[in-house]
Amino acid sequence: MYECIGGGIPEDFQKKTSTLSFFEDGMSNYLNQSFEKAVNAFEQVVAFYPYDLTSKFFLELAIGFTFTGVPSNWFVV
């Protein structure tokens, strides 16, 4: 997955680079279906930078999968 983090205002860039390790941890856990760990990582990002829409997106998905499990046809590219 790629996300453009340098196209906005400098404050956004600083916040996104500051939370990058949490985002990467969240994505790794999400892709490995460790959704509770993914939730914790994405919550760290959103707590520091609430405007990170990508982290919010994956946070909501991870929360949902924590409660419902993944569908039988779940496929990650």
Image (spheres, rainbow, N blue to C red):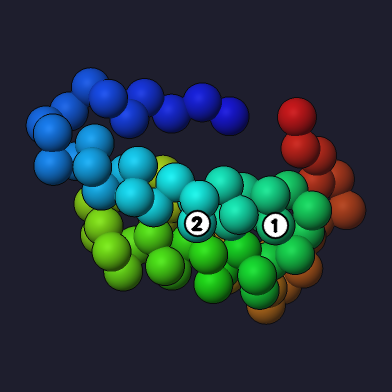
**Which residue sits at x=88%, y=53%?**
72
Residue 57 makes an appearance in the image = no
**Which residue sits at x=32%, y=30%?**
5
**Where 13 falls versus 7 (above or below)?**
below
The residue where tag 1 is placed is 29
Quadrant occupied by the C terminus = top right
Amino acid identity at mark 1: Asn
Neighbour tally class for label 1: few under 14, some 14-19, many 20 plus, Cα within 10 Å: some
**Can you tell which of label 1 and label 2 is closer to the viewer?**
2
Quadrant occupied by the N terminus = top right
Neighbour tally class for label 2: few under 14, some 14-19, many 20 plus, Cα within 10 Å: many
Point out residue 18 in the picture as x, y percentages from the top left corner. Answer: 34, 50
13 on left or right of 53 = left
**Where 54 falls versus 64 (above or below)?**
above
Amino acid identity at mark 2: Phe
Residue 25, located in which quarter of the rendered image?
bottom right
Of 22 and 69, nearer the camera is 22
The residue where tag 2 is placed is 22
Of 39 and 24, nearer the camera is 24
Q: How much space separates mark 1 and mark 2, taking CA atoms?
A: 11 Å
Q: Secondary structure at mark 2?
A: helix
10 on left or right of 17 = left
Residue 10, located in which quarter of the rendered image?
top left
